[in-house]
Image: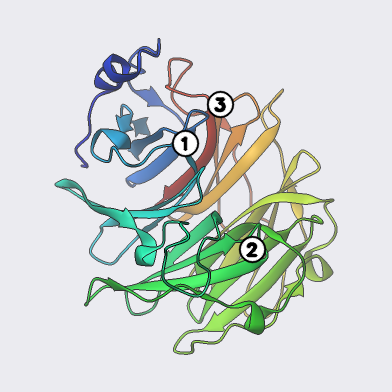
Amino acid sequence: MLLWASVATLLAMSGKAHADPGSYTGTEGHTTLDKFQVTGWGGVFHTSLTDGVWSRYGYIQEQAHEWQDVVSIASARDGADDLHLLATTRDGRLLHVLGDDQGWSGFGTVAGYNGGAADPGPHPGLEIGTTAAAIDENGDLEVLATVAGGHHVVHTTRYARALDWEQLHSINDEVGWRGAVRKIGLARSAARMNMFAVTDDGNVYYSYRNLGERTWAPFYNIKWQCGEPGPVTDVSAVASGDAVHFMAIASGRLWHCGATPDAWSDFVEVPLPSGVSPASVDLTTDHPGLRATITGADGTVHDAVSTGQVFGAIWSPFAKVLNDAAPGPFVDVSAVG
């Protein structure tokens, strides 16, 4: 269990009139799942789900005061059961922190990159936009991010043994240029690291890197495989064994698509809760199936679980996470099972 400041401590710091949300039984689960949520005012909160009960919110900035004005997040769990949290900030920094049962440690910028003109590396002064993360076959943390208004996708690795970062570098020459990238999903399947990139024209491009290799395959439009759901605005990906799944928000609706080593499924619409317009989506494992989390345009957070098949998956109705006393409204979410 991660150690956190209480919401009451946060309220004393911020003056925001939110009550302690207490616990809430949402969609049933049987393993501990960790969820991170970003508020519209840049705060990052954590809650966990164990045996169907959500814990009270914990406030990350209590231990990381330099983590201000966060706008988006990504998370991953490594083989030691430690959590990695990535965050992008309004001023273009890319941040990382490691969490274990003693709390959070190692707050800092990814690969020394903080968006400033004095930064070393191939893209000095170019602000980070969005990010995605996954653990690779060696137990290392793989991170993708966009810079320069989405005109470059950059990659770095945090090596588990050395606890050191590879320098950020552009992979545009490998994947190709298909337009400015607005959102990224990243997931490791049994044989590949899989990337999904949403461009500013609403398309979703897929690339992969075979495990044991360092080069990414050229982008191709996933709509050629899964169909046309409309202009896509957000995407999230997860893998289970040799299958890879991703969810997309398109035209105010939520869609699921997946692939086995042999075939892609079509996009299948996942019913949304009544009156909720999805703003962001996250997809993670919830053994033996999947869990989808959305933030609504109204700042609420909702979960649904599925049986996890690539073809013919059955989704539960969405359930609201926690209650109206949560310290939102929330604008982004990342969960890890």
Q: Secondary structure at mark 1?
A: strand
Alpha carbon distance from label 3 to label 2: 28 Å
Residue annotated with mark 1: 38
The amino acid pointed to by label 1 is Val
Alpha carbon distance from label 2 to label 1: 30 Å
Left or right, residue 213 beside residue 63: right
Whether label 3 touches label 2, CB < 8 Å = no
Residue 294 quadrant = top right
Q: Is residue 276 placed above or below 316 in the rendered structure?
A: above
Return the x and y of residue 106 as percentages of the image width and height: 23, 55
Whether label 3 touches label 1, CB < 8 Å = no
Q: Secondary structure at mark 3?
A: loop
Return the x and y of residue 203 as percentages of the image width and height: 79, 60
Residue annotated with mark 2: 310
Residue closer to the observer: 243 or 122: 122
The amino acid pointed to by label 3 is Thr
User: What numbered label is drawn on residue 300?
Assistant: 3
